[in-house]
Image (spheres, helix red, strand yellow):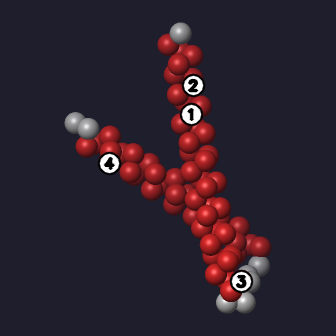
Amino acid sequence: MLSSASLNLESALFYITLLAFLASGFVYTLSVLIVHAFQKRIKNFRYYFISYLISGVIGILLIYLFAFIWLASLN
C-alpha cells in the first residue's frame, strides 16, 4: 500500500510540474502576443515558441524555488 501511495505522489509531482510549465508559458506568451498585436509588431512563430519554452522553464524554476524556501522555513 505504501508503494502505491508513493507512485501517486510522484505522478502528482509530475502533473504539477507539467501544469506549471504549460501555464506559465501560455500566460507569458499570450500577454506578449497581445502587446505585440496592439503595437502592430507581430513576430514570427519561432520567436513566440522560444519565449514559450523559456518562460515555461522559468516558471518551473520559480515554483520549485518557492517550494524549497517554504520547506526550508518549516524547520
Figure check: 6 above or below 75: above
Gap between marks 2 and 1 measured at Cα: 6 Å
Gap between marks 1 and 4 measured at Cα: 20 Å
The answer to whether marks 1 and 3 mark residues whose Cβ atoms lie closer than 8 Å is no
Q: Residue at x 77, y 79 (%)?
A: 44
The answer to whether marks 2 and 1 mark residues whose Cβ atoms lie closer than 8 Å is yes
State the quadrant of the C terminus.
top left
Q: Is residue 32 visible?
A: yes
The answer to whether marks 4 and 3 mark residues whose Cβ atoms lie closer than 8 Å is no
The answer to whether marks 3 and 2 mark residues whose Cβ atoms lie closer than 8 Å is no
Figure check: 30 above or below 66: below
Mark 4 is surrounded, within 10 Å at the Cα level, by few (under 14), some (14 to 19) or many (20 or more) other residues, namely few
The nearer-to-camera label among 4 and 3 is 3
Gap between marks 4 and 3 measured at Cα: 38 Å
Secondary structure at numbered mark 4: helix
Q: Which residue is mark 3?
A: 37
Gap between marks 3 and 2 measured at Cα: 42 Å
Q: Residue at x 25, y 43 (%)?
A: 73
Q: Which residue is mark 1?
A: 12
What's the amino acid at mark 2?
A: Asn
What's the amino acid at mark 3?
A: Ala
Q: Residue 52 is drawn in which quadrant?
A: bottom right
Gap between marks 4 and 2 measured at Cα: 24 Å
Q: Which residue is mark 2?
A: 8
Q: Which residue is mark 4?
A: 69
Mark 1 is surrounded, within 10 Å at the Cα level, by few (under 14), some (14 to 19) or many (20 or more) other residues, namely few
